[in-house]
Image (tube, rainbow, N blue to C red):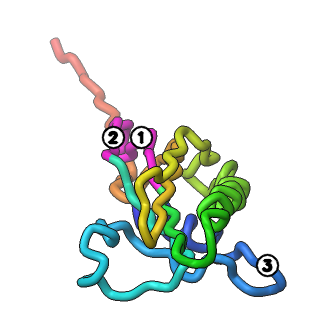
Amino acid sequence: MRKKLYMLIKQALLSLKENDTPIIKEVNYWNEQLMYISQEQPFELPAVFVEFGVIGWTHLLSGVREADCEIRLHIITDSRVGSWQQAIDALDFADKISQQITGLNDENISAFQLLQSETDHNFDELQDNIETYSTHITDTVAFKEPTKTKTVKLCIEVKE
């Protein structure tokens, strides 16, 4: 289910275009890319990294499970270029992403809702603004058809 969520988000983000050019250069899985930036594989900017929160499953019948799921989008922009205005413009970029992701849904995935926005107030070269979304998911990967029962007719004859 997480892969399905990730692919849905990635496709939606990569479809954001300006003059037929994608505005997001990279969408990937969050792995603390900014912690050791000089040791990380390089990535193009702007980039969005997808982070999954803890998923607390509720089990239904026949192997079906459901959960409310929080997903954090790390929106990484370059704040080195020009002036402080680019850092402010990154907030517009976050709004474009919100317009794309809010309401996004698919089979077994309810509409995404924006829960929280964290503005990066301690950036140097790269700014990491985080948008947290919630969706309700139903996972049928472990679904098993219920076992069919047979009806047996039993006749009892009593002899005296």
Residue 82: percent from left, percent from top: 62, 76
Q: Position of residue 61 (x, y in %)?
A: 37, 38
- Disc 3 marks a residue whose amino acid type is Glu
Q: Is residue 124 above or below residue 54?
A: below
Q: Are marks 3 and 1 in contact (CB under 8 Å)?
A: no
Discs 2/3, front: 3
Numbered disc 3: secondary structure: strand
Which span is picked out in magenta? Answer: 54-72
Viewer-side residue, 61 vs 12: 12
Find residue 1 and report its horizontal and vertical position in percent: 42, 60
Q: Are marks 2 and 1 in contact (CB under 8 Å)?
A: yes
The part of the image, by quadrant, that contains residue 20 is bottom right
- Residue bearing the label numbered 1: 67
Q: Which residue carries the number 3 mark?
A: 18
- The crowd level at tag 1 (other Cα within 10 Å; few <14, some 14-19, many 20+) is some
- Name, please, the residue furthest toward the left: 160
Classify residue 32 by image quadrant.
bottom left
Q: Amino acid at mark 1?
A: Ala
The answer to whether residue 62 is magenta is yes
Classify residue 137 as left or right of residue 31: right
Q: Is residue 20 visible?
A: yes
Q: Earlier in the sequence, mark 2 or mark 3?
A: 3
Q: Is residue 91 left or right of residue 75?
A: right
Disc 2 designates what residue? 57
Whichever of labels 3 and 1 marks the residue nearer the N terminus, that label is 3
Q: CA distance from mark 3 to mark 1?
A: 35 Å
Q: Residue at x 58, y 78 (%)?
A: 81
